[in-house]
Amino acid sequence: MVCNDLAIANFSMGHFKKLPSKALSHVRQGAPLYFVRMSCGHLREGMKAIQGIVNHLALAALVKKCDHHAQSAFAGLCECLPTGEDHAEFQRYVLPVRNKTAFHYDADQVKAALQFRTMHHSNSPCSMTIGEDIHSSRFDFADVVLDTIVCRKLWAIPVTADVRAGADRIAEWCFRRSVQFLDFGGDFVNRFLREDA
């Protein structure tokens, strides 16, 4: 399920980043941020499966039968587990996004983002795009608030730093974990079904 959801989220993110329609250009900022948030939520759930494989002797042994690429992806994902080198980054980049913005909206974070915008960007107007239907309408201010929550509050990108460069770097870190999950999951599940089902 995680592989399916990550594949859809990453495909959709790419689609919206390359959106050719000028009429829908107002979606370009909000859509990729939405799919990064969804990917963080799915990655969190996926890491439970990775931990379950590590803790299961037969499944851990099956990993050793996977191709080198899948084993490498699995090893990379294991670095996000509590004893791994990337655990701190996983805790910082993935968990708060999943817990505060991916599947619900944390009121305290919204309030803090509004205060941040008032302090640092009070002269930056936001627009609202009204189309013929809800699919072509966009509340840009909501995108700005969510972007502020994720980038400035949860990921702690400093005010003095280029927020887009910082967000792109962290989103790329999360994207690499999604790719690792897909690389591992594709081989592992296929092998499991062939050998043990």
Image (cartoon, rainbow, N blue to C red):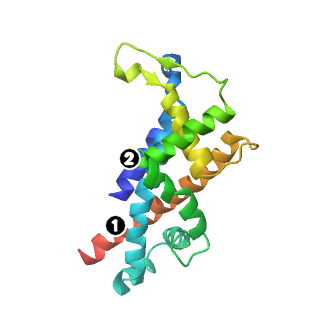
Residue 190 badge = 1
In the rendered image, which quarter is residue 99 located in? bottom left
Q: Position of residue 47 (x, y in %)?
A: 43, 67
In the rendered image, which quarter is residue 61 located in? bottom left
Residue ranking furthest to the top: 132
Looking at the image, can residue 10 be seen? no
Q: Position of residue 21 (x, y in %)?
A: 50, 20
Q: Is residue 3 above or below residue 49?
A: above
Q: Position of residue 142 (x, y in %)?
A: 48, 31
Q: Distance from label 1 to label 2 (Cα)?
A: 33 Å
Decide which of 1, 170 is in the foreground and name it. 170
Q: Position of residue 169 (x, y in %)?
A: 65, 50
Horizontal side of residue 71 vs 193, given as left or right: right
Q: Secondary structure at mark 2?
A: loop
Q: Is residue 119 above or below residue 191?
A: above
Looking at the image, can residue 12 be seen? yes
| x 66%, y 35%: residue | 119
Q: Secondary structure at mark 1?
A: helix
| x 67%, y 23%: residue | 123
Near mark 2 (Cα within 10 A), the count class, few <14, some 14-19 or many ≥20, is few
Near mark 1 (Cα within 10 A), the count class, few <14, some 14-19 or many ≥20, is few
Q: What amino acid is found at the position of numbered circle 1 in the picture?
A: Asn
Residue 104 badge = 2
Q: What amino acid is found at the position of numbered circle 2 in the picture?
A: His
